[in-house]
Every structure is written in C-alpha cells, then in structure tokens.
Image (cartoon, grey):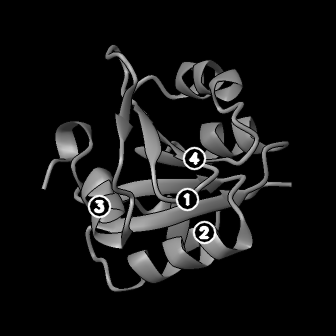
Amino acid sequence: MLRKLPWMVEQDSARVRVAVVNVSRLLGDVMSSIMAGEFEAEVVSEVRAGPMLRAVAAFRPDVVILGNETGRAEDHIGAIQAGVRTVRVIAVNADGRSATIYDPGLAPRWVADVSPPGMLSLIRNVGGKRK
C-alpha cells in the first residue's frame, strides 16, 4: 500500500519532485547519492514497475526516472504521462550511461551522458521549474 508520509505531503513549489521507478539497486544508490546534497530536488517515491502508476498518481512527481533494463520503457511512458500530464520521464537505458527523455508534447530525445552531473541537470531543468 502506498501512503504519503507527512514530510511528503508538504510540497515546496521550488523543489523538483522525483519518482524512481524500476531501477537496479546500483542505480537507485547512485540516484540517492545524487539527491542527498540537493535542496532543489527530492525523491518522493521509489517503486518497482507493478505499483508504478499508483505511485505516480499519489505523489505527482515532476520527473520519473524509469529503469529500462528490458528495453521496454515505451510500454509505460504513455500510462505515466496520462497520469501526470506534465511529467518528464527519463528512461535510463540498460547500460546505465545513456537515457531517452520523454517530455510532454515533444518527440523523445536520446541523451548520451547520464553521469551524476548530467542526470542532475536533466532533473533540475524540467518544465516550469528550470534552475
């Protein structure tokens, strides 16, 4: 069951809300370390693919980081963006070094650099919350 914890309910409009979905333990650890010192972004949910749509609806993130180890992220993109029409989805490829970015209303684009600084830039520069 998904539930919002008190610290998750209070939203700071200046912060970018991030949901991490279906990522490997290693990538999850990397994401946690990237966000640890960030005051501009917060991880609001970490889930596997099964409860993903409920988590997206419950936490309404600005960015979803989606593990794409199977190469089938496209199967989930439409459902994620239907739940939150303004969400950016970053589908990290199986190699962990590149990603495909899905912004609402735009064609998908491939990004070669998803190193920690590159990923942080993709998270910060989302929608109306560009930093």
Q: Label 1 to label 2, Cα distance in Å? A: 8 Å
Q: Label 2 to label 3, Cα distance in Å? A: 14 Å
- Could you tell which of marks 3 and 4 lies nearer the N-terminus? 4
Please rate how many residues cluster around mark 4, counting C-alpha atoms within 10 Å: few if below 14, some from 14 to 19, many from 20.
many
State which mark lies toward you, 1 or 2.
1
Using the rendered view, name the quadrant where residue 2 is placed: bottom right
Residue at numbered disc 1: 96
Q: Amino acid at mark 2?
A: Leu
Numbered mark located on residue 27 in the image: 2
Secondary-structure class at tag 3: helix
Please rate how many residues cluster around mark 3, counting C-alpha atoms within 10 Å: few if below 14, some from 14 to 19, many from 20.
some
Spot occupied by residue 30 in the image (x, y as percentages of width and height): 52, 76
Secondary-structure class at tag 4: strand
Residue at numbered disc 4: 93
- What's the residue at 59%, 57% (across, down)? 20
109 or 28, nearer to the observer: 109
- Could you tell which of marks 2 and 3 lies nearer the N-terminus? 2
Using the rendered view, name the quadrant where residue 71 is placed: top right
Numbered mark located on residue 118 in the image: 3
Please rate how many residues cluster around mark 2, counting C-alpha atoms within 10 Å: few if below 14, some from 14 to 19, many from 20.
some
Q: Label 3 to label 4, Cα distance in Å? A: 14 Å
Q: Amino acid at mark 3?
A: Gly
Q: Are marks 4 and 1 in contact (CB under 8 Å)?
A: yes
Q: Is residue 79 above or below residue 96?
A: above
- Could you tell which of marks 1 and 3 lies nearer the N-terminus? 1
Q: Label 4 to label 2, Cα distance in Å? A: 11 Å
Spot occupied by residue 72 in the image (x, y as percentages of width and height): 71, 30
Q: Label 4 to label 1, Cα distance in Å? A: 5 Å
Spot occupied by residue 31 in the image (x, y as percentages of width and height): 51, 71
State which mark lies toward you, 4 or 2.
4
